[in-house]
Amino acid sequence: MAAGFIRNIKNKTDILLDQVKKGIKEEGTKKVKETALKQIPTPESIKTKFKDLSNKNPKEAERYYTRTKNKLEGIKSGLEASLIKIQNLDEKLGIIDEDINKIVRIADIIDPFLTPARIFLGAQQATIAASSAPPAGTGATPLAIAAADGRRKTLALISLLVELVSIAVPLVKTINNTVDKFRGIIPNALASINDTIDKIQQLLDLLEELYINLLLPLLEGYEEIDGGIESVEDLYNQYPDLESFLTSRGNANLSSEELPYGVTNGISNVPPKFFRRYRKNPYTDIY
């Protein structure tokens, strides 16, 4: 029974430890090195690409910006999900701690009696053998038979407890060492993922900065905007039709309908040079 009790806990902890090991590998080292770092572009490659795009149709810049942004954000989201999964691995280690503590508590109770119990067991071996029930008709009283049977049961219980501690102590030590090892690895895995997330965020910031800097010279009046342009969202808010133009197919532009003097079709108080550059005719008469 003692061996079965220990074996059940060992099997359970083995499964949990295997899940933790695989989780750290798949969501930590492997995710960072094979999935993230191999896929993300370098800052230099992004700068080089925008330098090349600066002499081309800005729609190509928008496509590169959106494609790269989506890719980076997808990898970043995957890493953020891995953070949660690895943090949850510590909960599995907590379950292992609870199971091991069950064994430890039993062992702590038994341990003070272990040495005397072993001595007692050794001294009682002859008595156990001699206390076997005699054949019928030998004259042994029921009381003597019951006493001998009681001693055997008592000694069997003591033997079980000694066996339990003998098996449990090295097992607890081995499992605790493994748990401590994983608890040391998990913070490193989390740090590695967080560092990679920070690196991706820096690339996203660089991507946005270069994209804005490429478009701004094409837009008239941006210097007059209070607070300047801090994000692509700000840029699109200041020039509402800019995004739809950049994401449209071909060189589609705003309607050629002539508007009254000073009206800018809702783009800004000063029409952006970008739209004028790609139109055959201006959409206001203020030029």
Image (cartoon, rainbow, N blue to C red):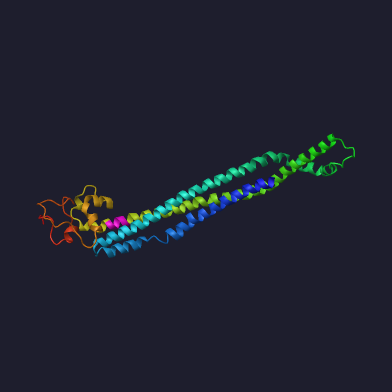
> How many discs mark residues in the rendered view?
0
> Residue at the location (35% across, 60% down)?
43
The span picked out in magenta is: 207-211
Q: Is residue 262 left or right of residue 119?
A: left
Q: Name the outermost residue toward the right.
A: 138
Residue 28 placement (x, y as % from top left): 48, 55
Q: Is residue 249 left or right of residue 155?
A: left
Instruction: Note whether residue 4 is visible.
Output: yes
Quadrant into which the N terminus falls: top right
- For residue 211, which quarter of the picture? bottom left
Quadrant into which the C terminus falls: bottom left
Instruction: Note whether residue 239 is visible.
Output: no
Residue 286 vertical position relative to residue 139 in the rendered view, above or below? below
Q: Is residue 159 magenta?
A: no
Residue 139 placement (x, y as % from top left): 90, 37
Q: Quick one: 57 or 131, which is closer to the camera?
A: 131
